[in-house]
Amino acid sequence: MSTPAKTEQTATAHLSLDAKDLAILALLQQNARMTVKEIADKVHLSTTPVHERIKRLESSGVIKQYATLVDHTKVKKGLIAICYVSLKEHNKTAGTKFIKAINAMTEVIECYNISGEFDFMLKVVSEDMNAYHDFHVNKLSQVENMGHVQSVFVIGIIKQTHQLVY
């Protein structure tokens, strides 16, 4: 019996996306609140096939979720830091514990397992430098097996997009 993740991965691997699917995805990335009718008009299909395509893209995992993008400065998250983290030990148990701890931290909005000098790259948001210091000292540094942390602070955002299909 396969796990749900494997089933989703397999379904996505066999899903062939045509030009209409890609056009639908591009439109939904620009505005996920577009109606099926609006999308249908733009991709030159009727509403029923567009609706069916969207449902297929959702059920196959191509569309993972719908989200609202929020301006971080307007919700008291004015400081963005990129934290490079290396662990002391590199084994499955240590990695799993680290990932579980990071997933519980609301300040961490993205986490990537990376190659090179560091093991992980975190995108962290906080209200200001004092709040970041509190997070760093009382949460991040307290994670078991923490090796080295290097923080880089974002001065300005030049480009920020979540669009993968154009």
Image (cartoon, grey):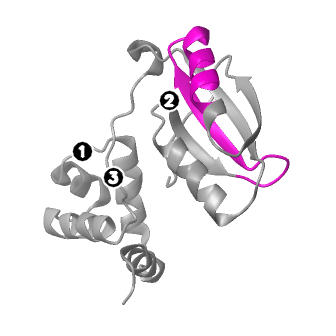
Drawn side of residue 16 relative to residue 124, left or right: left
Question: Which image quarter: residue 71?
Answer: top left
Question: Which amino acid, by three-letter code, is at mark 1?
Answer: Met
Q: What is the x, y in percent for residue 60?
A: 34, 72
**Which is nearer the N-term, disc 2 or disc 1?**
1
**Residue density around tag 2, few if under 14, some if 14–19, many if 20 or more, within 10 Å:** many
Drawn side of residue 153 relative to residue 42, left or right: right
Q: What is the x, y in percent for residue 81?
A: 64, 25
**Which is nearer the N-term, disc 3 or disc 1?**
1
Q: Nearer the viewer, residue 124 or 53?
A: 124
Where does the magenta region start and end? 114-140
Q: Which residue is mark 1?
A: 34
Q: Which residue is mark 3?
A: 65
User: Is residue 38 located in the magenta-colored stretch of the structure?
Assistant: no
Question: Label 1's element?
Answer: loop
Q: Are marks 2 and 1 in contact (CB under 8 Å)?
A: no
CA distance for labels 2 and 3:
21 Å
CA distance for labels 2 and 1:
31 Å
**Residue density around tag 3, few if under 14, some if 14–19, many if 20 or more, within 10 Å:** few
Residue at 15%, 62% in the rendered image? 47
Q: Are marks 3 and 1 in contact (CB under 8 Å)?
A: no
Q: Residue furthest bottom?
A: 1
CA distance for labels 3 and 1:
15 Å
Question: Which amino acid, by three-letter code, is at mark 2?
Answer: Glu
Q: Which numbered tag is attached to residue 107?
A: 2
Question: Label 2's element?
Answer: loop
Q: Nearer the viewer, residue 119 or 141?
A: 141
Residue 28 visible from this viewpoint? yes
Drawn side of residue 36 relative to residue 161, left or right: left
Residue at 36%, 90% in the rendered image? 1
Q: What is the x, y in percent for residue 41?
A: 23, 54
Question: Which image quarter: residue 153?
Answer: top right
